[in-house]
Amino acid sequence: MKLAVWLDGVIFKANLTERLYKIYKEGSFELPTLGNAETYGDYLVLKEYEKDMAILSPFSKEETERLLKKVQLKPSILVYNKGKTKPSLIPYKELFEVSEWDPLEVITIGASPLDLLSCRFYDSRVRIICVNRREECDKYSPTFMINDLNELGRALRTLKVT
């Protein structure tokens, strides 16, 4: 089992849905940095999955690396914004090219409808765990819903992947 975790919304308290949707509709421009953005306290649960985890980020390489350093996460794969990010299949296309992972063995962890939509654009068979944060993310039929990352272990057992 491999995890693909969206940095914004799952780890950091950042709601970029409106801004990302505007970029998608009107064209490309760079996202601002998160500055001193707060994290969700439950993100430390992800530490035990680092060796089989990819981080998907809508930010530049520099901003993504800065944020990961702040939370001391070291994923095995890092996919950052190279001009097009969610909602798009581009992040997943890059993830599966770089990792050579089988999409059927990957579980995406997201917190917004755009996280789920990006995954669905690439391959509807990729399983999705949606973390209820600021907005409802059940719009695009996640495989499983959890209230916070402390429920991740239970969700993975329910999905029979651990």
Image (cartoon, rainbow, N blue to C red):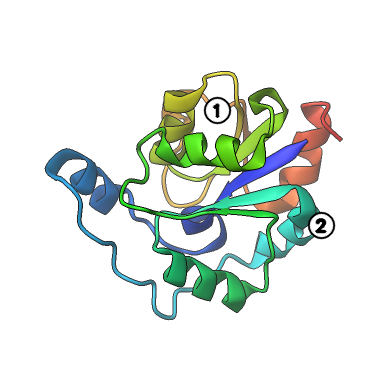
In the rendering, at what x and y percent does residue 23 appear? 21, 48
Residue at mark 1: 142
Q: Residue furthest right?
A: 162
Quarter assignment of residue 24: top left
At horizontal 62% and vertical 73% (from top left) the residue drawn is 71
Quarter assignment of residue 34: bottom left
Q: Is residue 8 visible to the viewer in this orientation of the structure?
A: yes
Q: Is residue 130 visible to the viewer in this orientation of the structure?
A: no
Q: Amino acid at mark 1?
A: Pro
CA separation in Å, label 1 and label 2: 23 Å
Between 60 and 12, the one lying in front of the other is: 60
At horizontal 45% and vertical 65% (from top left) the residue drawn is 61
Residue at mark 2: 48
In the rendering, at what x and y percent does residue 105 appear? 72, 28
43 lies left or right of 50: left
At horizontal 37% and vertical 42% (from top left) the residue drawn is 86
At horizontal 60% and vertical 76% (from top left) the residue drawn is 69
